[in-house]
Image (spheres, coloured by chain):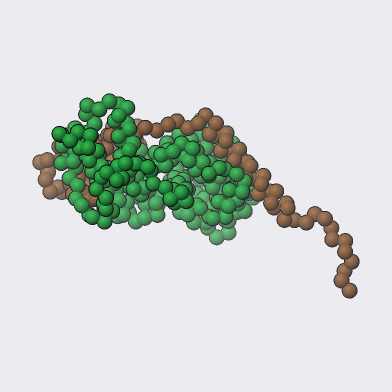
Chain colours: A brown, B green
């Protein structure tokens, strides 16, 4: 598996943590302290590179859900429910057993 | 894969909802609407004028309020669908898994532990369903990157220096559409478990602890796997850039 240096790993953690904090607060969040680094002088530059790299993910195309997704999902659940109920009913004999008791 | 009653019954039988463990005495008959006689659980009281939390909606559903379930589906349709499309790379498959996920929520509602959060539980189910689908189809994205770029990265332990990997500004001079296609190819060319953790962390911003719960892996593995995912992404991106522009 590919691995990152400790400083790169720290940069990734910081940027992801900051995104989470920004989302939670609804606005920007300050960068946390980086802690002990192997190469502190280059860390701001490293951080910028990692931010640029992760920022590429914003270009990952996605598509909106189909308009009827909610309705189809609820329908699927309903259908399953009815099928399960039908199975339950089918397992119960509603016809009385009128055979005479065995001698 | 289509949603049909038989499929639903089968999926219920396979106990696909793996992370949240049922508590003794709370098992329900799958496929039925939640039992109204379930004992009350301790949740914060709804605040007038404020929307109900996910957990409160699920609790109301467990007491027979179908609108609560519909609200949950509505609330998560965009986020969960986006995750599934990005993870599976296929709209139709994403829709199927979306439906199966909420079917599982319905079937497991009685087993939901109110001490936990609904959102990671939902993603646990969705990720399990998506992985099952990929396994059942023995699926790998048809992607030329897989063959074009150095194989064997799972075991090599190769160090990637992000500073060097990104020496050229990533994505510069690329048209928007081309950039999107290249990012898509890069992400879809990643091993499933690396793509999954990258999506959960970057787009859905789950804390590491919740990712640990969702994926059922130790916290330390979350970190190492996530770092490996970023390294993998960087390496693939660099290779793609080099293939595109050999002079760079």
Q: Residue furthest bottom?
A: A103
Residue A73 visible to the viewer: yes
Quarter of the picture holding the C terminus of chain B: top left
Q: Which residue appears at 84% of the width and 61% of the height?
A: A97
Q: Which residue appears at 58% of the width and 52% of the height?
A: B10
Percent of width and height locating residue B140: 39, 46
Q: Residue furthest left?
A: A41
Percent of width and height locating residue B85: 42, 38
Judge left or right: residue A39 versus residue B72.
left
Q: Which residue appears at 22% of the width and 51% of the height?
A: A3
Judge left or right: residue A59 versus residue B23.
left
Percent of width and height locating residue B228: 27, 49
Residue A6 visible to the viewer: no
Judge left or right: residue B158 versus residue B183.
left
Percent of width and height locating residue B215: 39, 51
Q: So how many labels did they put on this image?
A: 0
From the viewer's side, name the closer residue of B101 and A19: B101
Tell me: residue B19, above or below residue B62: below
Q: Which residue appears at 31% of the width and 45% of the height?
A: B146
Judge left or right: residue B31 versus residue B194.
right
């Amino acid at each position: 598996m590919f691995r990152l240096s400790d400083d790169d790993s720290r940069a990734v953690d910081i940027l992801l943590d900051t995104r989470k904090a920004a989302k939670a607060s609804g606005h920007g969040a300050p960068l946390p302290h980086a802690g002990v680094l192997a190469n502190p002088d280059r860390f701001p530059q490293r951080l910028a590179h990692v931010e640029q790299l992760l920022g590429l993910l914003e270009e990952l195309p996605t598509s909106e859900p189909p308009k009827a997704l909610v309705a189809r999902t609820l329908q699927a659940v309903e259908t399953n429910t009815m099928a399960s109920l039908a199975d339950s009913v089918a397992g119960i004999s509603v016809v009385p057993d009128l055979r005479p008791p065995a001698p | 894969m289509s949603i049909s009653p038989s499929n639903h019954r089968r999926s219920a039988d396979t106990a696909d909802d793996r992370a949240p463990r049922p508590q003794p005495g709370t098992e329900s008959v799958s496929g039925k609407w939640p039992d109204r006689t379930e004992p009350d659980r301790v949740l914060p009281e709804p605040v007038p004028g404020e929307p109900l939390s996910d957990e409160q909606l699920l609790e109301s559903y467990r007491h027979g309020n179908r609108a609560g379930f519909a609200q949950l589906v509505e609330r998560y349709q965009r986020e969960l669908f986006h995750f599934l499309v990005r993870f599976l790379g296929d709209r139709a498959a994403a829709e199927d898994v979306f439906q199966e996920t909420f079917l599982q929520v319905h079937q497991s509602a009685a087993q939901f532990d109110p001490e936990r959060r609904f959102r990671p539980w939902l993603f646990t189910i969705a990720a399990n369903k998506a992985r099952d689908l990929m396994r059942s189809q023995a699926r790998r994205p048809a992607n030329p990157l897989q063959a074009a770029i150095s194989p064997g990265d799972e075991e090599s332990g190769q160090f990637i220096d992000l500073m060097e990997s990104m020496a050229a500004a990533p994505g510069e001079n690329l048209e928007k559409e081309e950039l999107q296609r290249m990012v898509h190819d890069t992400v879809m060319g990643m091993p499933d478990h690396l793509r999954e953790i990258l999506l959960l962390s970057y787009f859905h911003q789950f804390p590491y602890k919740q990712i640990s719960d969702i994926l059922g892996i130790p916290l330390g593995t979350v970190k190492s796997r996530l770092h490996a995912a970023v390294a993998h992404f960087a390496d693939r991106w660099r290779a793609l850039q080099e293939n595109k522009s050999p002079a760079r």
